[in-house]
Image: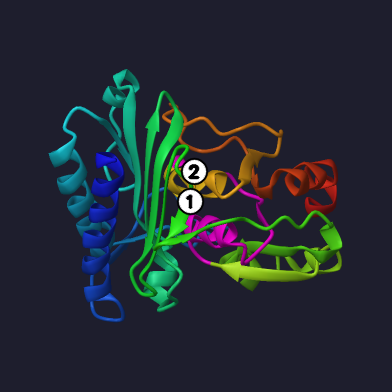
Amino acid sequence: MKELDAAKQAAQEAGQIIRSYYQKVYQTSYKEGYRDESGIKINPVTEVDLKSNEKIQEVLKGTFPDYGWLSEETKDSEERFHKKRVWIVDPLDGTKEFIGGIPEFTVSIGLVEDGIPVVGVIYNPITEELFWASKGGGSFCGDQRLQCSRQEHLPSVRLIVSRSEYQKGKTESFKSLVSEIIPLGSSAYKLGVLAQGRGDLYLSHHPLSEWDICGGHLILQEAGGILLDFNGKEIKYNQKRVETGGGILAGNEALVRKTLQKLDLFLT
């Protein structure tokens, strides 16, 4: 599939750029409008994010100039609403981990058709894990086919959570509900790890943006999992509001639906 091949190429070429800057000197700024409860700016962007974005756009828009485009690091345009196929990109998902020298950041690329993911690629440029999937074609890391966990018993669950939330103690109350808590960086990377079966359930309290989860959504789906919002609804992409309405749950269907029924335990 030409789109899948192009997405792999774009992710790996962008990954080379990211890797060349890792743990070296680069410029960092902060996006306006993002502050924590103390008023501290919390949404960094580096020159590496931007250079990765340029490379991905060069490869994908150069090969498929008529497809729509939505990226965290490109000014949004309503042109994408008029396109049947749209690339949805996070050129460096996990910027905080990149800055902190924690190798849990990725390039995330998804392609949607009428709002439904049909191609997904996630690339960790440090571990060189390349997750990929096409609709109906299965899910892989390198040449290894992926199958998500079939664990359904909540007390035995390995729960994947946000590294930053874990460090702030916001997941402490989950310890009595599950077997293990696994903090990870990039949202896309969480979905790849989940598709591998290295965890059983991923829960995010907070809304995520389309570019955070689009590529990983299909990879998980093709590995036998589902991703739903807290209302139990599937995420549809290429929407005017790029953030999900609330938190998300991901894992095998039986476990996700059981967790939805007990969601109040995780929201206290």
Task: Find residue 85 and report its image quarter.
Answer: top left
Numbered disc in front, either 2 or 1: 1
Q: Is residue 127 above or below residue 241?
A: below
Between discs 2 and 1, the one toward the N terminus: 1
Residue situated in front as seen by the camera: 200 or 214: 200
Q: In the rendered image, is residue 43 in sight? A: yes
Amino acid identity at mark 1: Ser
- Local SS, label 2: helix
- Judging by the rendered image, the residue that carries numbered circle 1 is 139
Q: Is residue 229 magenta?
A: no
Q: Which residues are magenta?
A: 185-210
- Judging by the rendered image, the residue that carries numbered circle 2 is 218
As drawn, is 171 to the left or to the right of 111?
right
Residue situated in front as seen by the camera: 203 or 34: 203
The quadrant in which the N terminus is found is top left
Locate residue 236, reporting x and y percent. 51, 30
Locate residue 229, reporting x and y percent. 65, 38
Determine whether label 2 and label 1 are within 8 Å by CB. yes
Color style of the picture: rainbow
Q: In the rendered image, is residue 168 in sight? A: no
Locate residue 4, reporting x and y percent. 31, 45
As drawn, is 33 to the left or to the right of 194?
left
Q: Is residue 197 magenta?
A: yes
Amino acid identity at mark 2: Leu
Q: Residues within 10 Å of mark 1 (few under 14, many from 20)?
A: many
Q: Residue at x 64, y 39 (%)?
A: 228
